[in-house]
Amino acid sequence: MHTIIEPFRIKMTEPLLISSRDQREQWLREAQFNSFLLSADRITIDLLTDSGTGAMSTKQWAALMMGDESYAGSQSWFNFQSTVKEITGFKHIFPVHQGRAAERILSQTRLKPGDIIPNNGHFDTTRANIEFVKAEAVDLVIPEAKDLSCDHPFKGNMDVESLKSLIEAKGPEKIPFVMMTITNNTFGGQPVSLENIKAVKEILTLYKIPLILDAARFAENAFLIHEREAGQSTKSLLEIAGEIFSLADGATMSAKKDGLSNTGGFFACNNNQWAEDFKNMLILTEGFPTYGGLAGRDLEAIAVGLKEALEMEYQVYRHATVEYMKNKLSEIGIPLILPAGGHAIYIDARNFLSQIPSSDFPGISLVNAMYLEGGIRGVEMGSVMFGKRDPETGAETPAPFELVRLTFPRRVYTQSHFDYVVEVLKRVWENRENLPIYKITKQPPFLRHFSAHFTPTTRRGSAST
Ligand SMILES: Cc1ncc(COP(=O)(O)O)c(C=O)c1O
């Protein structure tokens, strides 16, 4: 069959708001022109993130009812532990309330000021947690990733030569671990090949540096390895995932992605000392090691979700959605990162709005235009999220790219919802020369995209609301 259908049917519905442009203008103004600050019930199609926004299956809902809420040693913990062990093979497993808790505890227990952590692409919370303890987060993605239209099948790969040079230049003692993010969210949700993970591991073994995976989208990465890497198409996704994890010494995980859960995560590792230190900090700040800040029912839902994310039919459908959107938007002429990654479409806002320089945040103009046109929420991944601001002088260093990510919640929207998104984007594209720019009027010292305030400016220098 040519038509790839959603491999589920809908048992429960949730109303979507259909709003007017006047309403949206008022609501966006009230949200200080930052779509993170919009009330979610004022959004029609929410593509802000795939994090914790998925629909759970009947099996997950049933598992919730089996949640054992004992403080210590609950049955739900043992179910969770055995599933994570079966998939990853790691010796020590710790639940956490979400991925960044694992990043925080890992950073605070293993890093000291001046350490360097290379990654194929640090996610913003990973970078922030590393920098918070005064270590340095370095991105070493392959050069092809910086050519947005280059059709490399594994644009999330790490640049192995640069990694080698960095270790030799700084010394392995400065690098307590190396991370690989699968898929590479910061650089377009692009997958990492098994071959690349093996090559990185080989170098790290020489220098005795541990490899830690940021495994938030490990199942999507396994699927793209299955589809794109020579010799992998006969393996199951569980086998491919097992091979990926067998190359690492540990992993941080946000279960809000490929755990198909609305919350949760874990840290896993093989090293006993790392585990001991992690456990002690976990008890101090998250909870007892058999629940780590989660309810027993969350542990149950994640245990089921991790397995469902590795089902081939699910991944075929999920990737078909991404490809469908890529094809429809490309037909209109909208510039995108190619090939499509695992969980989102990334619009190249710098080319979409070529009249707006990075210093005027083209991604914010595009995100706000999509909301005003059709109530769609996307997210800027450009100079607001990844640019640097000198706290003394206020000088801005722009991000390498100005992207807008349309992220697809798992099992939530149907094809007609996506057709609507295409129609809205077509209108924004046709009106692209008339969009305002936005200036920041208030911002926190880090992770500013979450809470910054903006004001629209029709021409450079003059604010208007
Ligand atoms: C690659 C990656 N790592 C880590 C995280 C952080 O996870 P959480 O939001 O659960 O803290 C995210 C969240 O989007 C992510 O995409």
Image: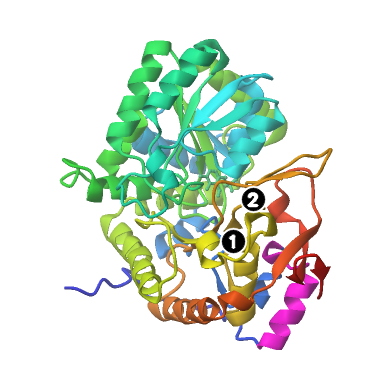
Q: Position of residue 203 (x, y in %)?
A: 36, 18
Callout 1 environment at 10 Å: few (<14), some (14 to 19), or many (20+)? many
Q: Is residue 271 above or below residue 10?
A: above
Pick whichever, 237 or 394, lies toward us.
394
Circle on res. 275: none
Q: Position of residue 450 (x, y in %)?
A: 70, 54
- Name the element at disc 2: loop
Q: Residue at x 83, y 40 (%)?
A: 393
Residues at badges 2 and 1 in contact (C-beta under 8 Å)?
yes
Q: Position of residue 329 (x, y in %)?
A: 40, 72
Q: Which residues are magenta?
A: 20-36
Which picture quadrant has residue 205? Answer: top left
Residue receiving disc 2:
385
Q: Is mark 2 within 8 Å of ligand 1?
A: no
- Name the element at disc 1: strand
Overall secondary structure of the magenta stretch? helix
Q: Is residue 418 above or below residue 175?
A: below
Left or right of 137? Residue 214 is: left
Query: Can residue 156 be seen from the camera position used here?
Result: no
Residue receiving disc 1:
379
Q: Amino acid at mark 2?
A: Met
Q: Is residue 272 above or below residue 315?
A: above
Pick whichever, 168 or 122, lies toward us.
168
